[in-house]
Image: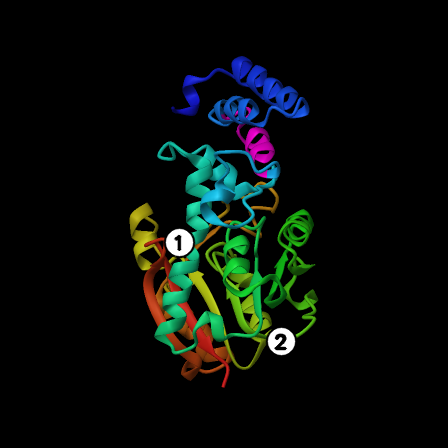
Amino acid sequence: MNGTELDAERAMALLREGEALLAAGRREDAAGALRRAREARATRLAAHGLIERHGLEGSFAQMMGLDCAISPQDDIFHFFDGHPTSTNPLRDYLADGWRTLSELMLLLESVDRPLLKLGSVLEFASGHGRFTRHLVKAVGAGGVTVSDVVEDAVRFSRQTFGVRGFASQARPEAVRWPEHYDLVFVLSLFSHLPRGSWARWLARLWDAVAPGGLLVFSTHGTEAARRVGRALDGEGYAFNAASESSAIDAQEYGTAYTDERFVRAQVRALMGEEAIARFEPTWFWHHQDAWVLRRD
């Protein structure tokens, strides 16, 4: 059933009923009421949280074998929840993280650096764990460190998934790396950066890569710009001060478009074009370009 078919008042009544049934130890009946409450946007996350926390029938953890808790502050989940094409936002959000894992693993295999052979991974600009939960299932919490400029996001991932984590900074030069990593994975950060900080972040993140390690990042490339009718400037760059994030200033985190020529020029200037191990257009989500840099 679509969430729009259940009004908010009825959904709240079902949520309260589910809570009362749980308190009375009637787990099966509680699961039924909460699954119905989960269909409505007004009560979706609250009902989902109770189902997952208590391991009730219909939990996503039963199907996926990982922690499926979702933070109420998760902007990416709310993007799915408000998107007109998403008929099951919880499923779509969780499946999207799994898709990212498969795309990353295939990309790493193509440069002969399998994910499961890497000792340490930094997920930078990690958000509230859309991808982190799947990464943890693959390599274990002990091999994962997360970082995000939103401190609540880091706190949620540390508490929920058992990973290490530290808050990022608004200025790349202010970030201090606690160690170096075999893989630094930066999904959909460079697709949001203004011109003034784009190369600065690339240089700073490169410093987090261990010798022999990889920096993998994504960009809105030529095809992404074409789809929205955005013209690029003479360097192959464009920026709009708007994004799906409500937690970061749009002037510092908007929507950026960069063609292959622009990115190669930045890499060439900072670490030499020989660092590029692979470039794949529209690799992530069949939308963002993928870049793999190797630190030899």
Residue 270 forms part of the magenta stretch: no
Residue 48 forms part of the magenta stretch: yes
Residue shown at the point (45%, 44%) measured from the top left: 63
Query: Are the two marked residues, 2 and 1, in contact with CB atoms closer than 8 angstroms?
Result: no
x and y percentages locating residue 64 in the rendered image:
46, 48
Type of residue at label 1? Answer: Arg
Type of residue at label 2? Answer: His
SS state under label 1: helix
Q: Is residue 245 left or right of residue 233?
A: right
**Quadrant location of residue 74?**
top right
Q: What's drawn in magenta, residue-wise?
A: 41-52
Q: Which mark is residue 180?
A: 2
Q: Nearer the viewer, mark 2 or mark 1?
A: 1
Residue 261 appears in the figure: yes
x and y percentages locating residue 218 in the rendered image:
43, 61
Q: Which residue is mark 1?
A: 99
Mark nearer the N terminus (2 vs 1): 1
Residue shown at the point (56%, 49%) measured from the top left: 251
Q: Which mark is residue 43?
A: none
Asked whether 2 or 210 is in front, the reply is 2
